[in-house]
Image (cartoon, rainbow, N blue to C red):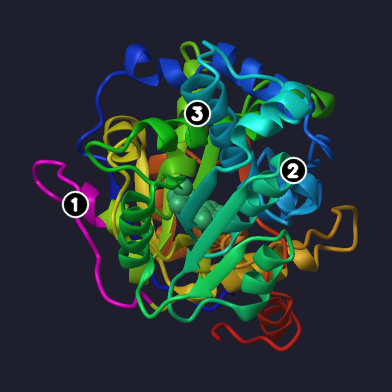
Amino acid sequence: MTARRKIEFQANAHRRSLDPSALAFLSEDVARSVRRFHAGLPGYAETPLHSLPALSRTLDLGAVFVKDESRRFGLNAFKGLGGSYAIAMHVSKNLLGRDEVCSYEELSSAAVRARIGGLTFVTATDGNHGRGVAWTAEQLGVKAIVHMPKGSSPVRAENIRSHGAQCTITEHNYDDTVRMAAEAAEANGWVLLQDTAWPGYETIPSWIMQGYLTLVSEAYEQLPQSGVDRPTHVFLQAGVGSFAAAIMGYCLSRAGNEPPRIVIVEPDQADCLFRSARTVDGRAEIVSGSMPTIMAGLACGEPSSVSWPLVRDHADVFCSVEDRVAADGMRILAAPAPDGDPPIVSGESGAVGAGLLYAIMQDPDLDPLKRQLGLDRESRVLLISTEGDTSPDIYRSIVWLGGDDR
Ligand SMILES: Cc1ncc(COP(=O)(O)O)c(C=O)c1O
């Protein structure tokens, strides 16, 4: 018997029929071009897609897969996919006047370096996005300035500085830190490279979302190696919702008549999409304040203006969960049953989908959600571990010592 976890869920009452035009910027064609770009970056390799047959037997599911983004470019998280593609698009389109993204080879040529050497990118981050931006800036010989919210992990800040970026931990929460970065960009003529959007600032965040498509396009290519064509269910963790909307958009644009069920999961302290889903008219709701949660990557209170309409129109269920659900997921993935599944190092924001899936299948109180999602022996569930142990001290305190909080 599992200890009960606090999990609230909301079936999506705003769901509309599939709108291919709204999702066109996240299609397979776009993903192919994004992936070609990433494949040219130093250190590119597909990340593993793990099949977890022992876990799926335990949970009475058909199959469970985990895409392990801890291996991405040696950055321990998926986020470098977005930052690198958006920087490349900005340089290609806005500075070099191209229609399409230039290859890394061209972008890092002496001729292009001479033109872009004076560029400065600025961003706000919980850690992972900033590290991706810093890493890309380092590759291209441009400058990166990164601001982190109050309480951010010093290890994550050091990792950002190790790529030559300037990095400070502010006195503000994530959303106010974003505003600070936007003001600094405006005042200094820097380029704001933010992974969330608002009216008037949507192009770069949309490129960042497109950057994430590489991981899901790889996953769809890897699934057939396990005899599976497509997932029936996709669990997507959300901060501002850019990641979730991007992956969802790709999955739906490839779905044909059998769209997978899309489950959005957020920490209960920063559940802005869940709260937005609960509004009568589907408007974006804001969570403010310090948003204390171990899921630092998901501690965002303001939905992205590009992603919210997409998930509002197309996701199936929104879940708001306590920190212990993420901690459960970390332990479940770290210490699999001895009969076959590989151990996976999955961080606080990476593992919450696994913890939620476990709870749904084990906790009788969540039977209505299980039924609603049609999770059964035919289900093939895709989880994405979006980060590894990006803060090793916190990871160990949770996985080794059973702590669920900082
Ligand atoms: C590890 C990890 N997973 C998921 C997310 C969520 O992404 P988004 O803010 O686009 O919803 C983040 C965001 O920083 C993250 O760092």
Amino acid carrying mark 2 in the image: Gln
Q: Is residue 287 magenta?
A: yes
Q: Find disc 2 in the rendering and name its residue.
A: 139
Residue drawn at 68 percent across, 26 percent down = 112
| For residue 46, above or below residue 193 | above
Q: CA distance from mark 1 to mark 3?
A: 22 Å
Amino acid carrying mark 1 in the image: Arg
List x then y, in percent, for residue 193.
46, 45
Amino acid carrying mark 3 in the image: Pro
What number is the disc on residue 260?
Answer: 3
Q: Look at the image and give the residue range highlighted in magenta.
A: 275-291
**Disc 3 crowd, CA 10 A, few/some/many (<14, 14-19, 20+):** many
Q: Is residue 285 magenta?
A: yes
What number is the disc on residue 278?
Answer: 1
Judging from the image, what secondary structure is the residue with disc 3 in? Answer: loop
Judging from the image, what secondary structure is the residue with disc 2 in? Answer: helix
Q: Quadrant of the C terminus?
A: bottom right
